[in-house]
Image: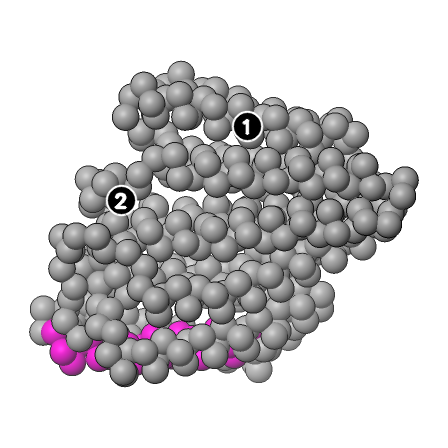
Amino acid sequence: MLPRDRTEPFRSASPLELLFDLVFVVAVSQASDSLHELVSDGHVGQGVLAYLMVFFAIWWAWMNFTWFASAFDTDDWAYRVLTIAQMGGVLVLAAGVHEAMAAYDFTLVTWGYVIMRFAMVTQWLRAAASDPGSRRTALFFAVGITIVQLLWLARLYLFDTMWQFVTFFMLVLAEIMVPVVAERQGRTAWHPHHIADRYGCFTLIVLGESVLASATAIFQARGQGTHALALVGLAAAGLVIVAGMWWLYFVREQGDYLAKIDRGFGFGYAHYVIFASAGAVSSGIGAAVDVATGHTALAASAASFVLTVPVTAFMLALWVIMLRPQVRRATSAIVIGLAVLVLVSAYLPAASIAATAALVAAAVLVVEVDARRHP
């Protein structure tokens, strides 16, 4: 298991990586559906907090595999078997998402997460045994991940619910610090264009949940009579929002930018906001559908915020990470202004989703013009 060539041309996601991503579709779908359910029942605070906690486990496990694969993907039988073992962990995690979000019972989520992470430890030990140049870094990763996983398991069985909640955030910090400390021993040979491609793949996964929400609105419109026209309008606006978010994400090539700055922590870590907010947009569309059909305890104004907050978060995070360094100041100012207007549009519940769609489309127009005038 030797490091890959960082200058390898045309490096993109492998078939195994794409299969790996498909398993995460299940976990993301469970998290989005559970958020929608809790929000529609009026438990907005619980739903949002639990969603962010569960999404950390999904995102962090995916991200750690992705960066390791970028540096050490050998695609031999042992690598494939360990990757499939991680996929099994994802399915266990997905099975526990609803209980975690509805009742803060993180038992299944934790075990699924730990299965994935211990498989990752085995991969790092292979790298340490195979490549003397990467040995110190790989061992730091393996030891650090192992210690934190043991603490995750101890947290389940040694603490009550309150202390499990408190220690969750402490262990999140510990997880985040493991790569920071390990990479200081020697940087792994991650490939900038491969990383950009992989992050693009996961963005498509989370946006796909919102496409499904728009499609569901159309399905529900059949036979709804008085609600049919409103549901079709919601579906159309939802599709425009999702397409606009996709357009904003992919309007600029990120591989060359990553190669230029030669740093990955900011890009990798800040994508949590992009991924989590994109995944939550489907709940916002679903909440709008529930309001239109009268199947929710949520007020129309509150439902508007369920949609506009994640769209605003997505636009602002995208600007910070990907657009700000590559567009003109005037373009940046307009994008920020449009993102703020998306949030403000929640105060017009009757027109919120249509206004959001129009504002996202306007942002697409602005960045597309900038990209064409200043490649």
Q: Is residue 280 visible?
A: no
Work out whether mark 1 precedes mark 2 in sequence or the reverse, and give the earlier one. Answer: 2
Query: Dot 1: what SS?
Result: helix
Q: Amino acid at mark 1?
A: Ala
State the colouring used for the structure image: one colour
Q: Is residue 106 above or below residue 343?
A: below
In the rendered image, residue 115 lying in the magenta stretch gets the answer yes
Q: Is residue 351 magenta?
A: no
Q: Main secondary structure of the magenta part?
A: helix
The residue sitting at 53% across, 39% down in the picture is 243
C-beta proximity under 8 Å, tags 1 and 2: no
CA–CA distance in space, label 1 to label 2: 25 Å
Residues 36 and 142: in front is 36
Q: Residue at x 77, y 45 (%)?
A: 289
Q: How many marks?
A: 2
Q: Name the outermost residue toward the right.
A: 226
Q: Residue furthest left?
A: 132
The quarter of the image holding the N terminus is bottom left
Residue found 67% across the figure and 49% down from its top: 215
Q: Name the side, left or right, on which 118 lies relative to 108.
A: left
- The residue carrying mark 2 is 255
Q: Is residue 294 left or right of residue 258?
A: right
Q: Position of residue 17 (x, y in %)?
A: 36, 66
Q: Looking at the image, is mark 1 or mark 2 nearer the viewer?
A: 1
Report x, y in % for residue 220: 79, 51
What residue sits right under mark 1 in the picture? 361
Which residues fall within the magenta stretch?
109-131
Viewer-closest of 298 and 136: 298
